[in-house]
Amino acid sequence: MPKVDALRRFLLPCFNSTPTSPAPPAPLTISTKKRLSTSLRDDLDDPKQDKKFEEDQEDSYPTTPISTTNPTTSASGAAISLSAPPRSSKTMVIGTIFGQRRGGHVWFCVQHDRLNTKPSLLLELSIPTTTLIQEMRCGLVRIALESSDSELNRCPLHSIPMWTLFCNGRKIGFAVRRRATQQTRIMLKTMQSMTVGAGVIPSGLVSGTESEEVLYMRANYECIIGGADSESFHLINPDEGPGQEFSIFLLRSK
């Protein structure tokens, strides 16, 4: 009897209980996907990550400088880079214009050092001294010396022995390169203490005659070297002096 009661208590709930449907499975959440999305969003929103990304992008590009020369192609097909033409250079020199007062021609002397009596360039111009004085009264003098001798294309510009002379656009003669004589060096020595000025040298000191005086004008010039075939000298007027424009151009045509 006690065994029957024990079975009844054990089996009766199994027959009388209402069947229940199985519980729906819990939604499957993939935590890794959520973490991945969060990680990508954080990467895009983080300015530090953006900056790091830009730096990585910059490091990925080549850092080789770009050449500014214009490439061309040779007959064999190889690329050749043409270098840019050289820039002009400017220096300061001392220029002296002098000539006999009557019946003489104009000379132009260039010195890099006023204490050195051996000029770097000495030219004798076929312009009479009186004619140059008249031209300078207008306030503008431009003297152009041109050389078209093909045999002198490779020699230095200061070594050309003869030039065709133009003054304010008019062809009036020639210019000849000269070597400094003893009289010229004596004259330059008397003006060593002077950089800017004009005056008269007494007769007999330079020309060796007793009846001729030498007029001179000494000033600073700006020397502009445009290349192997061009050079110019431009008078620099002092602050208290009149506005005189005086320029000499050396041009070699090929």
Image (cartoon, helix red, strand yellow):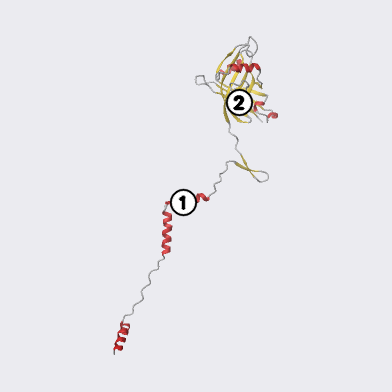
Q: Toward which corner of the image does residue 6 lie, by quadrant?
A: bottom left
In depth, the one of 188 and 20 nearer the eye is 188
Q: Toward which corner of the image does residue 234 lie, by quadrant?
A: top right
The reply to whether residue 39 is visible in this rendering is yes
Disc 1 marks a residue whose amino acid type is Lys
Q: Position of residue 17 (x, y in %)?
A: 31, 81
The residue carrying mark 2 is 249
Q: Quadrant of the C terminus?
A: top right
Q: Secondary structure at mark 1?
A: helix
The reply to whether residue 98 is visible in this rendering is no
Residue occupying the point 60% across, 17% down: 189
Classify residue 193 as left or right of residue 10.
right
The residue carrying mark 1 is 52
Q: Position of residue 59 (x, y in %)?
A: 51, 50
Disc 2 marks a residue whose amino acid type is Phe
Q: Name above or below for residue 2 compared with residue 68.
A: below
In depth, the one of 75 and 200 nearer the eye is 200
Residue occupying the point 48% across, 50% down: 55
Q: Name above or below for residue 153 compared with residue 191.
A: below
Q: Nearer the viewer, mark 2 or mark 1?
A: 1
Q: Residues within 10 Å of mark 2 (few under 14, many from 20)?
A: some
